[in-house]
Amino acid sequence: MTREKTLIDIQSQIKNEFGCLGDSDDKWAYLLKIAKDHPIMNQALVDDKFLVSGCATRLYCVPEFIDGKLILHLDTEQGGDNPMIVRGLAALASRVYSEQSPADILAADP
């Protein structure tokens, strides 16, 4: 039986992934790859009540709880000048916090 990855495990894995990259250009390219690979959020979830306030672009953050675990649906508005950096950062946040309990999220260092 495999143990579930903890939030700290996932954070460490992401740090290692970026740490293995050379210069900042490589890190930006990797973030853009993450953005491109991130699945498009179901458009039925797109609602202004889920807009992240103060974000430079239209970013939707839709929380869902399943069996006591948070599932984050995060995505930027699709189309034209899709802001890939914000989308990549949202994908990383989803990766870190999804499938974690609220207690584990609150106890972790962001």
Image (tube, rainbow, N blue to C red):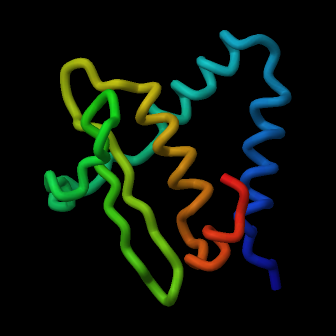
Q: Is residue 100 left or right of residue 17?
A: left
Q: Quadrant of residue 28?
A: top right
Q: Residue at x 77, y 11 (%)?
A: 23
Q: Is residue 87 left or right of residue 102?
A: left
Q: Quadrant of residue 92?
A: top right
Please identify the quadrant where the N terminus is shown: bottom right
Rendered position, 96 above or below 37: below
Q: Quadrant of residue 83?
A: top left
Q: Residue at x 46, y 26 (%)?
A: 85
Measured as percent of width and height from the top left, residue 48 is found at: 14, 52
Q: Is residue 60 left or right of residue 37?
A: left
Q: Looking at the image, which residue sits at the far front? A: 54
The one nearer the camera, 14 or 36, is 14
Measured as percent of width and height from the top left, residue 58 is found at: 25, 36
Q: Residue at x 58, y 28 (%)?
A: 31
Q: Looking at the image, which residue sits at the far bottom? A: 67
Q: Report the label total.
A: 0
Q: Residue at x 34, y 35 (%)?
A: 55
Measured as percent of width and height from the top left, residue 100 is found at: 60, 73
Measured as percent of width and height from the top left, residue 61 is found at: 34, 54
The one nearer the camera, 61 or 103, is 103
Rendered position, 78 above or below 41: above
Q: Is residue 47 left or right of residue 29?
A: left
